[in-house]
Structure formats: structure tokens, C-alpha cells
Amino acid sequence: MLKKILNLYLLLTFTSLKLNGQSQNITYFIDEGQRNSPLLKEYDNLIRSQASDSLILMAEYKPQVSATSQAMYAPVTNHFGYDSAITNGGNYSALVNITQTLLNRNAKKIKLNNLSVLNQALNVNFKITATELKKNITTLYLDAFSDYSKLLFNKQLFDLLKKEESSIEQLVMRGVYMQTDLMNLKIAIKTVEISLKKSNIEYKNKLSVLNQFCGINDTITPELENPKIELTNFPDINASPIMMRLTTDSLQNISAQQLVSLGYRPKLTAFADAGFNAINPNDFTKHLGTSIGLNFALPIYDGNLRKQKFNKIKLEENTRLNNKSFYIGQFNQQFFNLSNQLTLTNDLISTIESQVNEQEKLMRLYKIEIEQGLVKFMDFINTLNSYSSTVYSLKEAKMDRLQLINQMNYLK
């Protein structure tokens, strides 16, 4: 009987265990999280809006045509009324106006470039948010899977021991085992049952957090597939989202300087109108006409406003450079620390696996002694508990390894 339990236990430990239910993998949660993220949707709409801003800017530099009309009568009787020299007694007009900004090629180019930089910044923010979202979902999935694997292990172990309980009772009645052996088995079953209930609660809590974070409204408790996470190549700091944002910040500062300078350039605008303009509505057909002209503006003195704006931009650029220097050091230090932790964790896994191998050898010896009736039941239970604890430690170490790889893959 002990040999049967031992064989089933080994089978339990090294086979892929599943509950009866719907299966989900890490890709499903990442896809759902990105699809439901309100922040990603906001950035997507802002990026789409940037395309409209470019079209609006292009339209602003095209000729602007408008129509205006006025019908104004200012009555004068005795000592009541406005001075007719000012009002002419009335004004009746209907004009079509056309204005066109001249010498605008550089101004349009600068503003379009500014929109392009803003678009780059939005894309970088979108990427940063998507990367952080994927990293967080992976972290939550690994947490949930860790409890899920414990739940599976405890459930299978509980079912196995519970199934053999009646057989042990019969053997106790026949004098093969002692009553204390049966009591130890019942205690072991109760201990596993407690662990099973605890792991079930923890798994459902972790799954609830994962679903909530991903925006999934689902009450089903699914099976979780084993996550396959591999370490990517050495991360390129220049390709990291934060470094990309620092680069776009530099471009934004350059663009801001150009926009400030643009406000101090000469402006030349051509205008023209055509229609009628008269002080008597009966004479409007006699006063049809047109006019054309130029408006010119040149800033001369602004109280050092431009200088102050440039100084502000320079301070922002200095801040950016300081942030960049700090970030490079922080990035390299993070990678060094994570790499060191990963090396130590891999060494720990090797040590635990070595311990598992030794315990397997012991359990194979138990097989021989079981056949000869040399194994005490309590020794057998203790060996199973010790082996179970080691397997738990191995599972946790492997989950820690995946968490470290996740942090390194999404190092920012």
C-alpha cells in the first residue's frame, strides 16, 4: 500500500496537473489589458487628433475668405442723434474679404515640425504605458500562477491521500498498521486540506486582481497555462521608452525655441475685398467697388520677454540633461542588480534541484524497503512532507526567476 501511494505521489509531482475548467494563458490577459486600457485609448485618440491638427494648420495658411455685411441707420431729429460727421447717417455694406499671410513658408515649416515632435512624444508615452502595462500584467499573472500551481498540487495530493484513507483503515483493522499510523494519516490529510483551502482563496484573490487590472469582467475561475518567459538580449538603453522620451523632450525644447523666435519675425499679410459700401441704401448700386492692401508688423521691443522665454527653455533643457545622466546610471545599476539576483536565483534552483534528486534517491530506497516491510508509516509521511516542501521551494524559486526575467525584459 505504501508503495502504491509513493508511486502515485511521484506521478503527481512530475506530471502536468489541471483542473476541469476553461484555460487561459498570459497572452490572453495582456491582449485584454491593452484592449481595455482607458489610458492607451486616450493616447490613441490623441495621436489620431494630431493628424487633424496638421490639416488644420495647413488650412490656416491658405487664403481665408469671409463675407461681412452691415445695415446701420443713425437717426437725427432736432437735438437728438449722433454727429452725422461720424455716422454719415448710416452705413450699408456687403463685402467679400480675402486675407493671405505672405512669407509664411518657414513659419509653416516650424509649426508643422512642432506638431511632429508632439506626435513623437505621444507615441513614446503610448509605448511607455503599453510596456508598463504588459510588465504589470505579467507580474500579476506570475503571482496568480504561483498560487494556481500550489492549488493543483494540494488538490491532487488531498484527493490521493483521501482516496487511500479507507484502505489504511482496513489495514489497521487487520493489524498491518497501528492506530497511530491512521491518526497520522488523518492529520496529514487535514493539513493538506487546510493548505488546499488557503491556496484556493489566495488564487482566487490573485485572479480577481489580475482580472480587475485587465478590465475583465468574468466570474469563471480558469486554468492558467504555464508561462513561458525567456530573457531577451542585453537591453539597449537608447531603445528604452524613457530614453526615447528624454530625446523627444530635447526636440520639444528646440521646437519651443523656434516658436519663440517665430513670434518676433516680421509679418506681412495681403488683403482684398469687394462689394458695395454706402451711407444711403438707395445708392448702393452706385457704390460697388474693391480694395486691396498690405499689413506689415515688426516687433521692436518686448521688455526682454523673448530673453526670459529662452532662459526658461534653457533651464528645462538643463533639467532634461540632469535627468538623462541620472537615468543612465540608474538603468545600468538596475540591470546589474537584476543580473546578480538572477545568477543567485539560478544557483539556488540548481541547489534545490540537487536536493530533490537526493530525496528521489531516498524515495527509491523506500520502494525497496516497503517491499520488505521495513518502513515505518510515520517515516514515510515525514519523507513525503519533506519532499513536498522541497518541491514547493523549487516552484517558488522558479517563479522568482521568471519575475526577475520579467523585470529585465521590461527594464525602463
Image: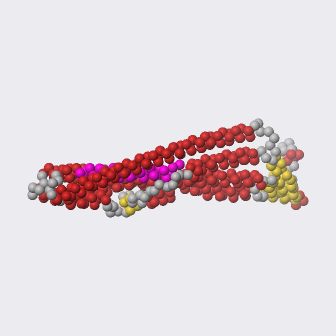
* Total numbered labels: 0
Q: Is 86 or 160 nearer to us in this picture?
A: 160
Q: Residue at 35% across / 55% down in the picture? A: 148
Q: Give the farthest residue toward the left.
A: 174
Q: What's the residue at 86%, 49% (across, down)?
A: 89
Q: Quadrant of residue 59?
A: bottom right
Q: Position of residue 405 (x, y in %)?
A: 45, 52
* Of 75 and 352, the residue lying toward us: 352
Horizontal placement of 284 versus 65: left or right? Answer: right
| Spot occupied by residue 319 in the image (x, y as percentages of width and height) | 62, 40
Residue positioned most to the top: 303
Q: How is the image coloured?
A: secondary structure
Residue 326 colored magenta? no
> Left or right: 331 with respect to 389?
right
Q: Main secondary structure of the magenta part?
A: helix
Q: Is residue 401 magenta?
A: yes
Residue situated in front as seen by the camera: 297 or 175 = 175
In the rendered image, which quarter contains the N terminus? Answer: bottom left
Residue 274, horizontal then vertical, whole percent: 84, 58
Residue 126 is situated, as x and y percent measured from the top left of the image, at: 56, 53
Q: Is residue 283 visible?
A: no
Residue located 50% across and 57% down the image: 34
Residue beneath the point at 65% across and 58% down: 51
Q: Is residue 32 left or right of residue 299?
A: left
The residue lying toward the viewer, choosing from 11 and 37, is 11
Q: Would residue 50 be seen by someone viewing this image from the given angle?
A: yes
Magenta-colored span: 383-412
